[in-house]
Image (cartoon, rainbow, N blue to C red):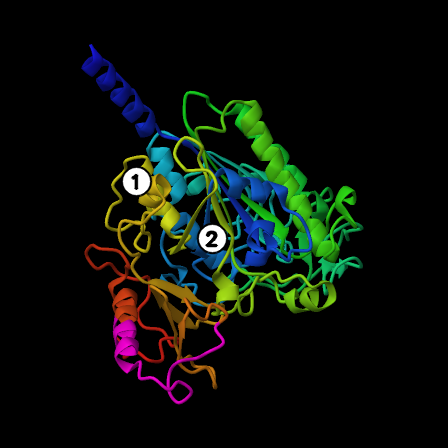
Amino acid sequence: MKRFFILCVALLTFGHASEKPNILVIYTDDQGYGDAASLNAESKFPTPTLDRLAAEGMTFTDAHCSDTVCTPSRYGLLTGRYSWRTRLKTGVFGSETPCLIEEGRMSLASMLKENGYATAMIGKWHLGMQFPGDRNNRDWSQPVTDMPLDKGFDYFYGIPASLNFGILAWFEGRHAKVPPTLYTQKKPNEIAIKDYRIMPPYDADLTDLSLPDENGNFKGPIEVAPDFVDSECLTRFTDKTIEWLKQRPEEKPFFVYLPYTSPHKPVIPIDQFRGKSEAGAYGDFMMETDWHVGRILDYLDESGLAKDTLIVFSSDNGPENTWPIRQEKFGHDSNGIYREGKRSIYEGGHRVPFFVRWPARVKAGSTFDGPICQTDIFATVAEIVDYKLPDNAGEDSVSFFDVLKTGNAEEERPAIIHHGVSGRFAIRQGNWKLVMESKKKGETRELYDLYVDPEEENQLLKPRGKADYSEMEADMVEELNRIIKSGRSTRGPAVENDTGWWDDLVWMEKW
């Protein structure tokens, strides 16, 4: 009888562990490592919800976005593949361009949908969409195509891209609730540093609108809906998330991707948070962001969903280049101890806050100090739902499910490839980071030991360095070249990149 009881308990435990959790990915925009109070003892504003995620889950102290700006990081998150393998080698997209997730490419959403999940994306997309007509001849009665609903999401509510890239309207499904039939330019934002607003009054008639280039970027007025106001983004996205969760098909587990627009410009905290921080409007805006995340957590608690919901919280890149002004004016380090910020190949550009809460599996208050990349979310989720990825999906994704289960990695993660906005590369192996030369004059090869020098102050390669690291350098370059040419970081057969050699690879021979 005793043995039978033990067997029953084991079977029940295994059965619970094998159930598919709900999954919620919350993605902030331009939030630096030091913009979470639990990661920055000198922070000039509180983030009680992020502190709660840390206290109730696992903090990853060495987590990285796959690029240092919006579009490529979002691609890496949703596909488990580095964006520099695609046609987008530098910069970001505007609003109106073919989606970077090409037809047939498995996404996190399509993979989970295939595995029985109800899927929703609410917030900022910034991966390209196709709108009806062109800027001089729109027909908003026609549907938007090549967008979230075509990439595995059952439901979409949000905006196409950053607020400085038209088109701006509240899209739900394939249509704007109120079409963007008016026009505007960026207006001054008097409460924030080097900033702008998108707010009425808007203009009714503008002629000779420039058409976007191949990446969806354009010059001139922004197309905007009469009811669009920038400061409503966080409230609307949070409200819609809770609304969708209440109406979701309860017979299925859910996946929600919630990419907020903050603290990216425009920095526009709502009235109840203005003046609440010691870091100006930016700190106020981060406090508002934290509060909205808290609203989501409160709903999960109230609805009994919290225990079986896996929450991943992170940011798409480091802080905007106003961070030095905040540092000087308020004594707040948005990049923490790390070098530089958004767009940069150095740690402040790509080391980001990263918390995972999953009460059913993850030990509360735990920490993991090994390196991971946001591309790894893809393989981790696939392992959680017991799905074997095909060879042509998640090529740069390494599961950290063992870390969530035990707090430790079974083996060291393969090299992570970092990538800056202008196309510069770096490779990370263990404690070592090799920054590559670029086509820009003065950007030469650099080696750092992040274990002793996380601030990247002491470049170790000759002529500055005294020791000989040439063998390590050669090995790291060889691995970088292998990862680039083979089309993947993970084990498996070589696959094609979307292009051949390109001119950022100045150290490599053409192929």
**Where's residue 140, x and y in %?**
60, 43
The amino acid marked with disc number 1 is Glu
**Where's residue 239, x and y in %?**
63, 33
Task: Answer whether residue 149 is magenta in the image.
Answer: no
**Dot 1 lies on which element?**
helix
Q: Residue at x 42, y 43 (%)?
A: 151
The amino acid marked with disc number 2 is Arg
**Where's residue 219, x and y in %?**
64, 65
Which residue, given by chain and number where applicable, does mark 2 sit on?
74
Label 1 vs label 2, nearer the camera: 1
In the foreground, 468 or 199: 468
Give the residue at the far bottom of this rendering: 463
Q: Residue at x 29, y 20 (%)?
A: 12
Q: Height in image: 217 above or below 445? A: above
Q: CA distance from mark 1 to mark 2?
A: 21 Å
**Dot 2 lies on which element?**
helix
Question: On the rendered structure, is 320 left or right of 397?
Answer: right
- Dot 1 or dot 2: first in sequence order is 2
Magenta part of the chain: 456-478
Decide if residue 194 is in sight here. Answer: yes
What is the quadrant of the N terminus in the image? top left
In the foreground, 267 or 453: 453
Which residue, given by chain and number where applicable, does mark 1 sit on?
383
